[in-house]
Amino acid sequence: MFKIDMENGKEFSSAIEALCNLIDEGTFTIKRDGIGLHALDPSQIAMVIFSMPNSAFSEFQVDSQQNVSLNLENLNKILSRGKGSQLTLYDEENRVVVQFAGGKSKKSFKVPMIDLGQSIDREPKVEHDVNIILNTGAFKDAVRDIALVSSHITFEIKGKKMMMSATGDNAEAEIEYEEGDDGSVKSMDVKNTAKATFPVQYLEDMIKGADDNTDIEVSLKTNAPMKIKYAVGNAKFTYYLAPRIDLE
């Protein structure tokens, strides 16, 4: 049994919307210290790790650890109807009750739990050579620029310079940043050079939920999964994206 309350459900709704950019369904682990989720996208190219501590909620009751699998698209549509109302979530006969309260009115929905089998709880073990903190809005703009040219983006880091490039049938694009350059790149920790290529669409889906005015953390290693971290309020997101390996 669990029961969760938030005075304003907008933060939780935004977190679920961010998850929906990449996955359609997933299994939440609900335990005394908060809510978590590990999931692969349907193509198994990308992974998302989500967590939200119990301190983010006005009330957080759980008898024992529970795994709750849901269709996230359905949940997202329902949460979007909350419009900043008080949010309550609790389980009832293999369903999750989503209840909104505002003033003297209340409305509730019942979302059926689904069977997804065993949940994923392992994070890839990658010793990244590059860790970059940059402005989310600037990063989104750069990815959008690359998307005009190609479906894949190549990252190359040498010294304190980060270059993003792509070659398409009709055009080429290249964007270069240096640490401290116009505030876009806040810091760069570079242990070694790194170069890797990733699908643009997945990258766009992963960063779509991040606030443009916040910072995002990007970790890279040559021909290894990219790691992206950011927060949406109290919710924390970590993404991994597999690279494209060109066999010569």
Image (spheres, rainbow, N blue to C red):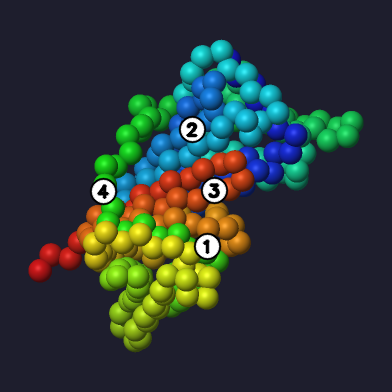
* Cα distance in 3D space between marks 4 and 2: 23 Å
Given the image, on which type of amino acid does mark 1 rest? Thr
Q: Earlier in the sequence, mark 4 or mark 1?
A: 4
Circle 4 residue: 127
Which numbered disc, 3 or 4, marks the residue closer to the eye?
A: 4
Extreme-bottom residue of the structure: 170
Q: CA distance from mark 4 to mark 1?
A: 23 Å
Q: Helix, strand, or loop for circle 3?
A: strand
Q: For mark 1, give the secondary structure.
A: helix
* Residue type highlighted by circle 2: Gly
Q: CA distance from mark 3 to mark 1?
A: 11 Å
Horizontal arrangement in the rendering, residue 106 relative to residue 210 (left or right): right
Neighbour tally class for label 1: few under 14, some 14-19, many 20 plus, Cα within 10 Å: many
User: Would you name the residue on which mark 2 appears?
Assistant: 36
> In the image, residue 157 lies at what x, y percent?
30, 68
Report the residue marked by disc 3. 231
Inter-mark Cα distance, 3 to 2: 14 Å
Residue at point 50%, 51% (across, down): 230
Residue matched to label 1: 136
Residue for point 28% across, 53% down: 128
Q: Would residue 244 be visible to someone looking at this image?
A: no
Report x, y in % for residue 134.
48, 63
